[in-house]
Image (cartoon, coloured by chain):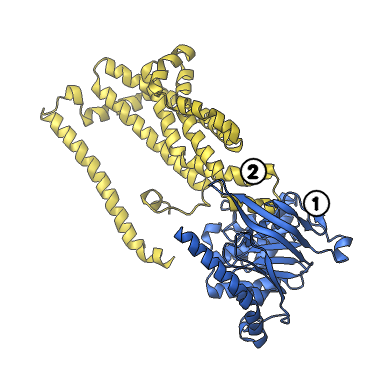
Amino acid sequence: MTVTTPSAAAREGVPAIRLRGATRTFAAASGSRYTAVQDVTLDIDEGRFVAVVGPSGCGKSTILNMVAGLMEPTSGTVEIYGERLQGINPRAGYIFQQDALLPWKTVIENVMLGLILRGVPRKEARAQGMAWLERVGLAPFADRFPYQLSGGMRKRVTIAQHWVTDPDILLMDEPFSALDVQTRQMMEAELLAIWSGSRKTVMFVTHDLEEAIALADEVVVMSAGPASRVVGRYTVDLPRPRNLMDIRMEPHFMELYGEIWSRLREEVLKSHERSRALGRQ
Amino acid sequence: MSEAGLSAGSERRRRGLVTTAQVGIAVLFLAAWQGLTAVGWLDPFFFSMPSRVLVRMWEWVSTGYIWRHLAVTLWEALLAFLLGALLGVIMGFILARIRILAEIIEPYIQMLNSIPRLILGPIFTLWFGLGVASKVAFGVTIVFFIVFYSTYQGVREVDAVVLNNARMLGASERQLLRHVLIPSALSWIFSSLHTSIGMAIVGAVVGEYLGAARGMGYLIAQAQGVFDTTGMFAGMVMMALAVLVVDYLVRQLERRLLRWKPAAGGAWQADAS
């Protein structure tokens, strides 16, 4: 019911993800209202890898949650392949920042889950799940429970868990932020290897500009919260496949970094000022 | 892993020490009891003697006299546990999923739970008679609340990220119940299992003590009626042994069903391997 090929309209240039004037407001405890993101308008074409960066607390996750359908915009709309999104986005997978595996299921049962939920027979689901565990190098751990794996391994399982259902869109919320630097680089490289040639649309939220440039086709910069919005879009024209080990040393990488950082820096400083002001109150 | 390997030797020594000390305490206690009553510092009429208790227990076991009483008590406890747990799980799920209902009913549940169970004994005897039913009803009133609160908590506090993850993987509401809510609540329910099974047994014994024609509580009450302290102690020890066995079985079951949970440190889990 969900794993459909992009419709004819999609191929004719309708963006995979379209946010139109999306605003999300929360009721704060004191009864006041807090606007996380305001008037975000953003098109993401099919097959693109787009990174969203911004100072912490700028509502990056709110945007992902709206695209995922876990959260409705207070005003404005989210369109997926030209259709207005209502409820959970059935064409998206979501790699959460926190541990999201079901702790009472083994690794393979976790990876099979999406298929089982779609009514795929167990045997076939298991075979597909094992193939994905093989790809992320965790086949020997199939019958372990999540608590028996390291943080990096759990993340790989989560990636397999969503990728096995073949979603058209992949939403990733600072997926590697909890990992150590080396593991992180390995995971980034693995992600690009899996993604390249898949034609999947990726929306990757991070606060790490280097990571954003290294991975993405395009970097979207958000302003400091509250009421953050899109303040810049930068095309990353580094050739693919990319060698993530050395890419950060390349002159063009540094050029892009300098350009985007000059914009992001303002927002980071603003965000810092605001949180300090809040602290003084 | 290597850390565990290194400390295995000292861990074994520690376990050995603990076991020795535990046995030592029991021996010391029994010896003191036997000695003090033998020399007459404690009156055996009121305190009996370990040797007499042991002989009585042997009589009960060898003649088979004890089994029907023990069986009745455990049967009542089992029924009370199953019924109380079932009602508790169902109510817990319903109230955790329907907030408004929980708000309406909450004061009543608090009120019922604050009733001392003992005073329900006479009314249950009146309603359900002297047989098994009144003891089961008695146990249910204890078990229900333990399981209800655990389930309620378990369903309410299910990890939002895990829940959303399952949603993104395509889970319908019914599938969420099966794959996320029930397993999550199960771990809470199991954490209350020791308490609730123990309470079911307490309920049965106390119920029998208040009025019954058989069962361990009845046995102890009968012994009390004729100032037979040996019989009272023998009944208590038999009951304690039965509870130990039940508790061991529960722990085995728990270990099987909650094997996805990291073993928390501490003496209770140390004997897992």
**Residue at left 26%, top 44%?**
B23
What label does residue B102 carry, if any? none
Instruction: Tell me how far mark 2 sits from mark 1, CA to CA.
Output: 20 Å
Left or right: A55 with respect to A241?
Answer: left
Residue at the bottom extreme, as displayed:
A251
Residue B59 in the image: above or below residue A244:
above
Apparent colour of chain B: yellow
What label does residue A1 carry, if any? 1
Q: Percent x, y for residue A139? A: 63, 65
Most foreground residue, B67 or B73: B73
On the image, which quarter does residue B183 sit in?
top right
Q: How many marks?
A: 2
Residue A144 in the image: above or below residue A252:
above
Secondary structure beneath label 2: helix
Q: Amino acid at mark 1?
A: Met
Subunit bearing disc 1 = A
Q: Percent x, y for residue A13? A: 85, 66
Apparent colour of chain A: blue
| Residue A127 shows in the view | no
Left or right: A201 with respect to A32?
Answer: right
Q: Which residue is mark 2?
A: B178
| Residue A192 shows in the view | yes
Badge nearest the viewer, 2 or 1: 1
**Residue at left 41%, top 50%?**
B269
Most foreground residue, B28 or A150: A150
